[in-house]
Image (cartoon, rainbow, N blue to C red):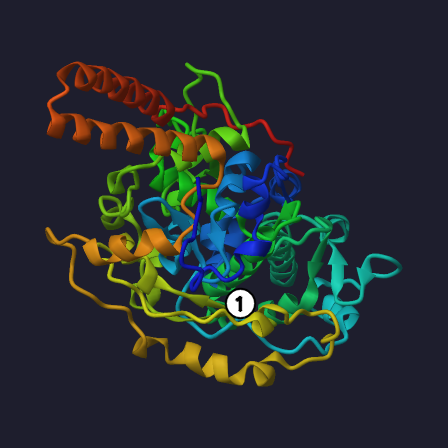
Amino acid sequence: MDPGPSDPSLLQLQSTHRSTRTWRGEVYETMRVRRRRRVVDRTMQYHSRMIPYLRSSGFYGISRVAFFSLDWALITAFVERWRPETHTFHMHCGECTITLQDVQVQIGLPIEGIPVTGTTDADYADVCERLLGRTPGGYDIVGCKLKVDWLERNVPAIDDESDEESVQRYVRSYILQLIGGCLFADKSNRFVHLMFLPLLEDFQVAGQYSWGSACLAYLYRELCRGSRAGAHEVVGASILVQLWAWDRFPFIAPQRLRVSRAQQRTVDGQNMLMDVPLGHRWLDAFSVSQNATHVVSAYRDALDSQRHEDDVVWQPYNELMGSLPEYYTNGQGSWLSTCPLICFHIVEWHRPERVMRQFGMVQVVPPNCAYDAQLHRIELRGHHHENWVTFHASYINMCENRGDTIATVALNEGHDHQDYMTWYPSVTRRFIGHDGALRDYSRNLVHRLRRVFIEDGYERGLAALDEGIKILDEDERQRSNLSHDGIDVQQDR
């Protein structure tokens, strides 16, 4: 059994990809997913006076997506299918990915705006004094990074009597904790990079940045790193991977009871259930009628067993878009843009032309996309005094002109994707694990034999093969009904 690809022209990094070691039986563990959002929710009091600043800065949406546990096994199973060459997940029925649409709709970060970039050449102790009211000392500030718990200890909570400057400092502290604990989390799980703090000096100016693009750039970079053979951790906005997977692959999602645990949540007497991004829906109670699995091999097997295009919900937001405030949809003009995503030193490509079914369009064979190894190697290390606006000027120019690179093809109105699906099997990694490959091989063998028996008139053998097909169908049905209720099994920090 050959998991592919038979044509190596697209997936040129296969030899060093995590899926190669998984196929060989060398990788079994669940990856550690780093974040600190639980601490933010536990230590930072949410006050109504924060809301105007969160709205104007672009962070109101993500502030409304409350904490819920991450399923490390599920995220690991999708990291195994992430391809740095294309920035897509490779599934049986084609490519799919997390796009700018998902970022804005699910967690409410703004998409339109200028790239999140600037200089890393600053006196960050002075910046902290000016924007947070205190100067970190000792080991609280290390180079360009600040210990997150310093914010908890040194920026006091606010109340109705707090002056406006104190409120602004508190909001900056809150946003920094979202940045370091969720959106741009790193492997230390203890620090936040201070290069973001100067961008929060003026909240109106902060709202002009494309925070959603930066978040997706950072996530793409970390998924690329996590997909390497030997990687043990994944960071970034991993909450997006889980929300995206639950909405598009219902056969591996927990069953929501639609009794939101947030329905009773109020802030200063205000009902905060309104005006929230779609990710908030998953702050819910789940059915516990079946035991949870939460094992990478179970998710891997379920995804390997996919056989039909209809197994994927390509457009999960269609019926919900009309109910969303403009705050979460006003970036539609960029959702289909093939453009660089920028976050200071990071430049990663957004490639909606490879996942047109996610936008209700026909998927054609996409144009070649060259993997830029040099771009992937650029890190902050060794560039602590860099002006990234100058360094990445050409990519920033492309980003500012992203309206010129909108991917468009025919709407999917009864059309099929035959050309794409003829091309795709030879260039993709068809299987991650042996169980799914064996099941697919057995099914294909039975169907081939059935065709032979029909042609030769062997009725007795035909009946036996039909029985075998029923058994395989039942096995597939049971695996498709895989339940993952009760997701709080991993210990998030």
Q: Is residue 461 left or right of residue 2?
A: left
Q: Nearer the viewer, residue 387 or 452?
A: 452
- Asked if residue 284 is positioned above or below residue 340 in the image, the reply reads above
Quadrant hosting residue 40: top right
- Image coordinates of residue 264 in percent, x first then y, are 44, 30
Residue at 42% x, 80% y is: 398
In the image as oriented, which residue stretches furthest toward the front?
A: 456
- Asked if residue 259 is positioned above or below residue 380 in the image, the reply reads above
| Residue 183 seen | no
Looking at the figure, which quarter contains the C terminus? top right
Secondary structure beneath dot 1 equals helix
Task: Give the number of callouts.
Answer: 1
- Number of other residues with Cα within 10 Å of mark 1, as a class: few under 14, some 14 to 19, many 20 or more: some
Q: Is residue 149 left or right of residue 59?
A: right
- Image coordinates of residue 208 in percent, x first then y, are 46, 71
Residue at 11% x, 23% y is: 457
- Asked if residue 281 is positioned above or below residue 335 in the image, the reply reads above
| Residue 153 seen | yes
Residue at 41% x, 14% y is: 289
Q: Is residue 138 left or right of residue 271?
A: right
In the image as oriented, which residue stretches furthest toward the right?
A: 138
- Image coordinates of residue 49 in percent, x first then y, are 53, 52
Residue at 52% x, 45% y is: 80
Look at mark 1 in the image and give the residue it sits on: 203
- Image coordinates of residue 48 in percent, x first then y, are 51, 48
**What is the three-letter code of the residue carrying label 1?**
Phe
Looking at the figure, which quarter contains the N terminus? top left
Q: Nearer the viewer, residue 268 or 284?
A: 284
Quadrant hosting residue 119: bottom right
